[in-house]
Amino acid sequence: MKTINVLMIIAVIAVVVAFANLIFQFGDFRELTGYATGNATDTGTANLTIASQASLEFITNVINWGSGAVDEAPTSATIDSEGTVTDGNWTAVSQGLTLRNDGNTNVTVYLTSSTAANFIGGTGPTYKLKVTNNESNSCVANNMSSYTSTTGGQVLACSNFGFIDAADAIDVDVQLVIPEDAVPGAKSAVITATGTPI
């Protein structure tokens, strides 16, 4: 009886082995074993963050009318950086300051400079600044499109000054009214541009 059971077990094992061999020979072994049959894909990611950086540069940073005086008859002379010299003999200047946004973000620009009294002196002087586009669409929201008096503090000049290369430069023109009683001597005023990222 035990011999029959042992023979029966051997026979079952032989049939299983024969069946498995048949599958391996004629079947798709790769599918049976889980072997990959198609292309496999996956993705990876490269990450970085570009920081916002505001940077302004006066690429034309000096206006110089040279030496001059108010004519005898009038009580004051008017000069500006757009070529005007009225009632005085200063050298005409036709180029203002040029400010470039060389950062990587649009900015709001404020201009700060001296008061007319501190810069020029005398009775009733004026000292005004004006902003125009040096490149089209540089200053999208111009707050100083006409001559505006300096205050000694920050004055909003351009609410939206772009940084794209073809539209990132503005001109800052200066207009002065010089009274006849202004104290003689060299006069100078610093104009500071401050940019706040938008």
Image (cartoon, rainbow, N blue to C red):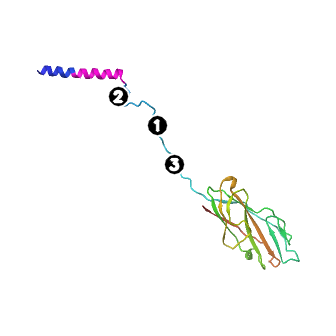
* Image-based side of 19 in relation to 64, left or right: left
What residue is rendered at 68% in x and 53% in y? 165
Please indicate, yes or no, whether residue 185 appears anywhere in the rendered image: no
Image location (x, y in percent) of residue 105: 61, 57
Please give the residue where the numbered disc 2 appears in the rendered image.
Answer: 32
| In-image side of 122 versus 27 (left or right) | right
Q: Residue at x 22, y 22 (%)?
A: 12
Q: Amino acid at mark 2?
A: Leu
Question: Bounds of the magenta span?
Answer: 12-27
Which label belongs to residue 89? Answer: none
For residue 191, above or below residue 32: below
- Element at label 1: loop
In this rendering, the answer to whether 75 lies above or below 44 is: below
Q: Is residue 179 visible?
A: yes
Determine which quarter of the picture holds residue 64: bottom right
- x, y (%) of residue 122? 78, 79
User: Residue 21 colored magenta?
Assistant: yes
Residue 32 occupies quadrant: top left
Find residue 45 and report its horizontal and vertical position in percent.
Answer: 49, 45
Q: Which residue is mark 1?
A: 41
Amino acid at dot 1: Thr
Secondary structure at badge 2 equals helix
Quarter of the picture holding the N terminus:
top left
Of the two numbered discs 3 and 2 on the same chain, state the one appearing first in sequence: 2
Q: Tell which residue pokes out farthest to the right in this image.
A: 73
